[in-house]
Image (cartoon, rainbow, N blue to C red):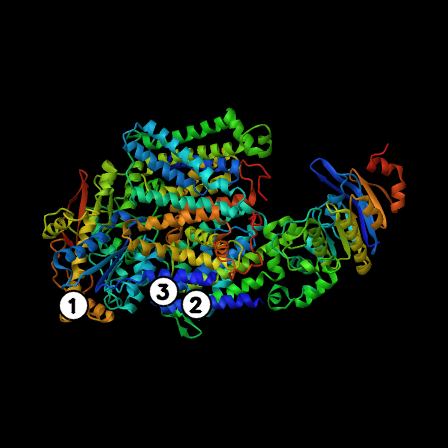
């Protein structure tokens, strides 16, 4: 196991959002994180990605403790994430965003900003176009400001940014929410594709069951801040407890 | 490097140089004033327009530059060394001012910069050994690379050269990761953080870069006036610079220079027109009135500034969409 | 001791005027999120309007009421004409537009009333009380008390009356206020009107103490340290912090500066600490922002992100 | 296109700015608006005298004079800009400039440009015919004014002196000179405190309480009329009598008793020029001029300006006559000639405003007396004395 989270607990005021959550993910594995609204899925992702600081627990990545590190440090350690809602970054182009993502890569960090000033980045541009934007069908809009793109494409840009860092652990927060089912399936394809190419571990929070079922290797179900079930997609679908909690069946 | 920006910047500088030759010493003085204001406005635009950090301490930062350059030059240092020294000192002080920005945001930080301005102004007045107190530091004519800068005309050259360098450098800055992270920072710190941008690092660097440029402008202003006086670097000056970048167009590439030219030349234009119209007696208040009204009208009716206005007048303009060109909604400006 | 008492009286008198100004700034901020640099302009214009009304022969009470009415009108007019079109504008633009208002107001007064200081007509009886070695003119007592009474009166109104309730509601939660049928944009106008009227009164009182000139507008800047120290969203905080800063400035001028200067002249080549009282409020502001950003009476989480 | 547009605007602005060249141009910058505006009578005085020459004599030596009055607003950058305009665009043959700060900042450039300059500041540092051959002054320096007051106190047996001054060069410069010269002690007096205040201060109550606690026998004010008004008003609040205070010659405006009434009674100030309305020949000229045009400020400063106008006109006239009645074609030459003519005046009659002027040492004259506010009017309380 490369990601091992144990006993992760975080409270907001008196409300316990995540309680003693545990999760393990191996490289190359796509784990789906599902559960009803308010189950603590995104909060858990936020803890792993450094946005929130849990009160207790450990999250180890290849043996290193991740808790307490800032998102920028995590990104440099190979942990990237996407967001539920795409940010309104009007002025930047698709390529700009991808470059920002790539800036966390180790090979891009030597020399610092002063060197950047005089360094051509056309090689990087080519690489990003071929490796990241092309598969995401963003190459044709690479030089457009993202405000001109549709919602679906903006979500793809957000994913492109995370992928440009060539992450080893990718945290996806509802990657297909708000997309048409066609776009959603395409996105799911991309995620699998990326996993195959980079061999990275993926945790995916998602509500759309068809996407989850067809994409994930394993599924973890959360409710009220805790893990209530873990198993293969087929097992999850078959479990009565999950059906009761999550699908509202008696 | 964006060659188009470089070509435009050099062309503008050559034009300004030609104007300074055509209109005598006063013309040279005004061209110099525009160039210096342009450099200062570029620096503030970097901070506010691109980085989203509102600062009312720009006037004092120019002062830091002027005093530093004056002291270095008076001690026998070459003018170029003095200018660079002023940049470094401006950068350091600016970064210090920026430290509270790591904890404070938006309005609170803006008010904190008011305090920075007030405290720096006070220091100018009492730190006699460095600033010569309220009397102001008289700056003897400097030499740049051995060439004496005794006249207003000779000073136009370094000012324009620095203007071009700064202008192009800012354009380049917005095309590297650091500049891009400024833009993200401007939109939302939370997003920036989530995207893995080191917010504190980026913020301090924004202040550092902006302060460096402000220091250069201050040094040039000191050389032009041959005096660094606390009266010259007040909150009014800070407000003037904010007016420049807003009137020119916040977060645009050409805006700062257009705004600077406008704010520097407008009072003089009103003055001359008013004199010709026989309004000498109430000209000063009229100038103020026009300035204030223009700020208000611009903000209400053309919040994207002269840049937008001019490009609308001339659809096929030279308007270069800056990396951070402000969108039509105006919502992407700093909160 | 008499010096301390005397300084305290002077500080409280000027501090109560600061409070009036700062309350106006907080009021506008609570209601519309705008930080008004033009509050000093309202004070200055108010003083000139009072002056004009007094010169026209009005009874001082009527003149002051008249001034507050005129300023109230100006305040709501500003809101309608200038601030409302800028609802979605960025913070820096809003700050700048109020600075523009300040410039315009100064220029207008300069054109109408000229650059020279003007002696303000006597509003309060001349003379002074002298007790226990303290010497206080009626002017000071009257201005100080009037400012304090009005500040408290205003706070009471804000707390206990229907319009105060609507104001608080609109300021607290715009959407909820709309839902229960409060006309929020009217409330914003009213807030601007009240704020300008208070500033007009403050300006008039200041003019009775200090005479009338364009420099009166400078009083507006003190509002920023005051509101940060008091807490950006607390009217009561503005009152307390206004008095506090008035006292602090007075003691700085009367006690701290002389001692400091005596010391410096004795031991160093520095001979003046300059206008130390001008930076003391800002030093306090910085300290407050670092230690307790929400101010003395502010609530956490009021920061706009 | 846009840049061409901007360039066109710039060009128009500057072209529109080019003046119609008058043959003889005198540039006066004062504080028409700004913190010192109350004492700006001298700027109007110079302009009006030159204007009166245009009206009565067709100008100077038959040449119309262009007397340009500009507003420096007591702002250094504005003043520095105006100076360049006067030297370069207006081709001024004589300049009258305002603030102490600007005169000191420009002193080297004035020499370099070779333009005769009369300063409204009495800063002793720029009064140096060798170092600053083009800078002239008409009256006792600030330091000399202060010494008159100090001597007066010593003569009356007082001891404790407090000096109050504004926080700018005008305020601090002369006070520093006095402090360092030790003249206070030499006169057997004691400088118990110096109090600096903001020149645009509105409230000085606390400072006055500080002054009160020093128990002074005399408080000298190195500031101008607007600040003196604040000081005297707040002195009354603190229970200090007006007679404790004495100000330099920029505190002798009738506005002070007008605005302060009782609080100004007993206040004294240094007088160096005859008051407006005194029965002297110059007054007749002024009244004749005033019959046709309104006089902006009817005070001593206007008289001072009128006197300076007389001096400027005399020097310019001399230079033109020297050149055979024609204006020298080269402005540099003209300015140099005017400077020499100015220095050559040793007994210039200014119609009784001052004793005969002697500019060979660049100072004109150095006598003064003390005047006191009595019954709402300034009344001389001593004889004219030589202030050297």
Badge 2 crowding class, 10 Å Cα cut-off, few under 14, some 14 to 19, many 20 or more, is some
Q: Is C223 in front, or is A104?
A: A104
Q: Which mark is residue D320?
A: 1
Q: Which residue occupies 44% across, 30% down?
A: C151
Q: Is residue D240 above or below residue A191?
A: above
Q: Is residue B45 above or below residue A107?
A: above
Mark 1 on the same chain as mark 2: no
Pinpoint residue A20: horizontal percent, then vertical percent. Answer: 79, 42
User: Is residue D366 among what the camera can see?
Assistant: no
Q: Chain of mark 1?
A: D
Disc 3 target residue: B27
**Element under disc 3:** helix
Judged left or right of residue A74, residue C278 is left
Judged left or right of residue D206, residue D327 is left
Quarter assignment of residue C137 = top left
Q: Is label 1 in contact with label 2 (beta carbons under 8 Å)?
A: no
Q: CA distance from mark 2 to mark 3?
A: 13 Å
Q: Which residue occupies 11% across, 62% down?
A: D347
In the rendered view of the protein, which quadrant contains the C terminus of chain C? top right
Q: Is A12 in front, or is D318?
A: D318
Q: Is D272 in front, or is B245?
A: B245
Pinpoint residue A228: horizontal percent, then vertical percent. Answer: 84, 40
Quarter assignment of residue A192 = bottom right
Disc 2 target residue: B15
Badge 3 crowding class, 10 Å Cα cut-off, few under 14, some 14 to 19, many 20 or more, is many
Q: CA distance from mark 3 to mark 1?
A: 30 Å
Q: Chain of mark 2?
A: B
């Amino acid at each position: 196991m490369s990601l091992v989270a144990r006993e992760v607990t975080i409270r907001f005021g008196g409300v316990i959002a995540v309680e003693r959550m545990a999760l393990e993910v191996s490289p190359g594995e796509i784990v789906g994180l599902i559960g009803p609204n308010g189950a603590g899925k995104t909060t858990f992702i936020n803890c792993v990605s450094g946005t929130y600081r849990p009160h207790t627990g450990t999250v180890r990545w290849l043996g290193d403790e991740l808790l307490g590190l800032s998102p920028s440090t995590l990104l440099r350690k190979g942990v990237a994430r996407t967001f539920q809602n795409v940010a309104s970054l009007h002025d930047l182009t698709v390529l700009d965003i991808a470059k920002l993502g790539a800036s966390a890569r180790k090979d891009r960090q030597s020399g610092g900003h002063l060197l950047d000033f005089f360094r051509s980045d056309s090689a990087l541009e080519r690489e990003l176009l071929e490796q990241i934007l092309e598969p995401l069908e963003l190459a044709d809009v690479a030089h457009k400001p993202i405000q001109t793109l549709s919602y679906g494409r903006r979500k793809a840009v957000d994913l492109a940014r995370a992928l440009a860092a060539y992450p080893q652990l990718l945290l996806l927060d509802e990657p297909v929410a708000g997309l048409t089912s066609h776009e959603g399936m395409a996105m799911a394809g991309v995620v699998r594709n990326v996993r195959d190419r980079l061999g990275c571990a993926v945790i995916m929070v998602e509500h759309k069951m068809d996407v989850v079922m067809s994409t994930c290797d394993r599924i973890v179900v959360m409710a009220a801040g805790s893990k209530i079930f873990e198993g293969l997609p087929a097992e999850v679908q078959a479990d009565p407890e999950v059906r009761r909690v999550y699908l509202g069946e008696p | 490097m964006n060659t188009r920006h470089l070509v435009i910047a050099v062309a503008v500088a050559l034009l300004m140089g030609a104007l300074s030759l055509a209109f005598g010493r006063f013309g040279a003085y005004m061209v110099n004033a525009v160039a210096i204001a342009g450099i200062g406005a570029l620096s503030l635009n970097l901070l506010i327009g691109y980085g989203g950090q509102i600062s009312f301490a720009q006037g004092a930062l120019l002062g830091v530059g002027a005093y530093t350059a004056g002291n270095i030059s008076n001690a026998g240092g070459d003018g170029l060394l003095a200018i660079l020294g002023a940049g470094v000192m401006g950068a350091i002080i600016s970064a210090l001012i920026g430290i509270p920005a790591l904890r404070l945001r938006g309005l609170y930080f803006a008010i904190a910069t008011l305090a920075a301005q007030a405290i720096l102004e006070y220091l100018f007045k009492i730190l006699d050994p460095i600033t010569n107190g309220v009397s102001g530091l008289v700056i003897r004519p400097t030499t740049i690379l051995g060439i004496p800068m005794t006249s207003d005309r000779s000073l136009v050259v370094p000012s324009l050269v620095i203007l071009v360098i700064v202008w192009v450098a800012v354009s380049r800055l917005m095309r590297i990761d650091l500049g891009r992270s400024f833009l993200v920072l401007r939109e939302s710190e939370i997003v920036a953080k989530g995207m893995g941008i080191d917010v504190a690092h980026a913020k301090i660097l924004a202040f550092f870069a902006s302060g460096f440029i402000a220091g250069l402008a201050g040094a040039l202003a000191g050389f032009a006036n041959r005096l660094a006086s606390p009266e010259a670097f007040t909150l009014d000056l800070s407000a003037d610079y904010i007016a420049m970048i807003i009137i020119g167009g916040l977060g645009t590439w050409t805006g700062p220079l257009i705004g600077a030219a406008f704010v520097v030349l407008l009072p003089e234009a009103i003055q001359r027109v008013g004199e010709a119209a026989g309004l000498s007696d109430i000209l000063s208040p009229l100038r103020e009135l026009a300035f204030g009204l223009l700020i208000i009208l611009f903000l209400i009716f053309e919040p994207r500034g002269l840049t937008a206005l001019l490009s609308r007048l001339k659809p096929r303009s030279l308007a270069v969409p800056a990396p951070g060109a402000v969108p039509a909604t105006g919502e992407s400006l700093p909160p | 001791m008499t010096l301390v008492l005397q300084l305290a009286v002077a500080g409280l008198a000027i501090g109560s005027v600061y409070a009036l100004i700062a309350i106006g700034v907080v009021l506008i901020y609570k209601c519309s999120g705008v930080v008004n640099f033009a509050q000093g302009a309202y004070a200055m214009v108010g003083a000139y309007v009072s002056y004009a009304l007094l010169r026209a022969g009005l009874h001082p009470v009527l003149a002051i009421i008249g001034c507050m009415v005129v300023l109230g009108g100006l305040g709501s007019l500003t809101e309608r004409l200038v601030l409302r079109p800028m609802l979605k504008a960025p913070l820096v633009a809003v700050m700048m537009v109020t600075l523009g208002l300040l410039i315009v107001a100064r220029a207008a007064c300069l054109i109408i009333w000229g650059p020279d200081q003007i002696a303000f007509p006597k509003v309060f009886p001349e003379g002074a009380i002298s007790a226990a070695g303290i010497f206080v003119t009626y002017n000071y007592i009257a201005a100080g008390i009037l400012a304090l009474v009005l500040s408290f009166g205003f706070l009471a109104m804000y707390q206990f009356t229907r319009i105060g309730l609507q104001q608080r509601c609109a300021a607290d939660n715009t959407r909820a206020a709309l839902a229960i049928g409060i006309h929020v944009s009217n409330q914003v106008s009213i807030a601007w009107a009240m704020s300008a009227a208070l500033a007009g009164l403050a300006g008039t009182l200041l003019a009775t103490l200090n005479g009338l000139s364009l420099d009166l507008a400078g009083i507006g800047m003190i509002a920023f340290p005051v509101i940060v120290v008091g807490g950006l969203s607390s009217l009561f905080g503005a009152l307390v912090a206004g008095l506090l800063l008035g006292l602090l400035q007075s003691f700085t001028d009367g006690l701290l500066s002389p001692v400091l200067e005596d010391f410096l002249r004795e031991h160093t080549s520095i001979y003046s600490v300059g206008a130390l009282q001008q930076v003391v409020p800002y030093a306090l502001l910085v300290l407050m922002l670092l230690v307790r950003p929400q101010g003395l009476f502010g609530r956490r989480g009021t920061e706009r992100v | 296109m846009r840049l061409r547009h901007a360039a066109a605007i710039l060009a128009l602005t500057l072209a529109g700015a080019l003046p119609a060249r008058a043959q003889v141009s005198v540039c006066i910058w004062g504080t028409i608006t700004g913190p010192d505006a109350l004492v700006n009578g001298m700027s109007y005085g110079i302009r009006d005298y030159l204007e009166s020459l245009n009206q009565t004599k067709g100008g100077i030596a038959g040449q119309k004079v262009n007397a340009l009055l500009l507003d420096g607003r007591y702002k250094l950058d504005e003043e520095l800009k105006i100076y360049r305009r006067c030297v370069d665009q207006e081709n001024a043959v004589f300049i009258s400039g305002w603030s102490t700060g600007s005169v000191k900042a420009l002193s080297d450039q004035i020499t370099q440009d070779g333009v005769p300059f009369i300063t409204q500041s009495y800063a002793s540092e720029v009064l140096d015919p060798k170092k600053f051959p083009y800078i002239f002054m008409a009256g006792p320096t600030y330091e000399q004014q202060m010494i008159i007051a100090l001597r007066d106190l010593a003569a009356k047996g007082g001891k404790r002196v407090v000096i109050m001054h504004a926080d700018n060069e005008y305020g601090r410069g002369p006070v520093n000179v006095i402090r360092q010269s030790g003249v206070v002690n030499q006169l057997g007096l004691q400088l118990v405190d110096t109090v600096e205040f903001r020149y645009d201060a509105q409230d000085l109550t606390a400072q006055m309480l500080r002054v009160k606690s020093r128990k002074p026998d005399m408080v000298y004010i190195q500031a101008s009329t607007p600040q003196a008004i604040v000081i005297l008003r707040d002195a009354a609040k603190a229970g200090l009598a007006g007679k404790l205070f004495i100000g330099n010659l920029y505190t002798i405006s009738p506005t002070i008793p007008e605005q302060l009434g009782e609080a100004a009674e007993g206040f004294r100030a240094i007088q160096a020029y005859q008051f407006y309305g005194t029965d002297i020949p110059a007054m007749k000229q002024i009244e004749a001029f005033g019959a046709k045009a309104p006089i902006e400020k009817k005070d001593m400063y206007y008289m001072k300006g009128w006197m300076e106008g007389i001096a400027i006109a005399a020097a310019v006239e001399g230079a033109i006559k020297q050149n055979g009645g024609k204006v020298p074609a080269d402005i540099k030459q003209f300015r140099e000639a005017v400077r020499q003519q100015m220095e050559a005046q040793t007994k210039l009659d200014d119609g009784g405003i001052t004793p005969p002027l002697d500019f060979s040492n660049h100072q004109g004259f150095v006598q003064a007396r003390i005047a006191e506010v009595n019954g709402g009017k300034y009344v001389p309380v001593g004889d004219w004395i030589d202030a050297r």
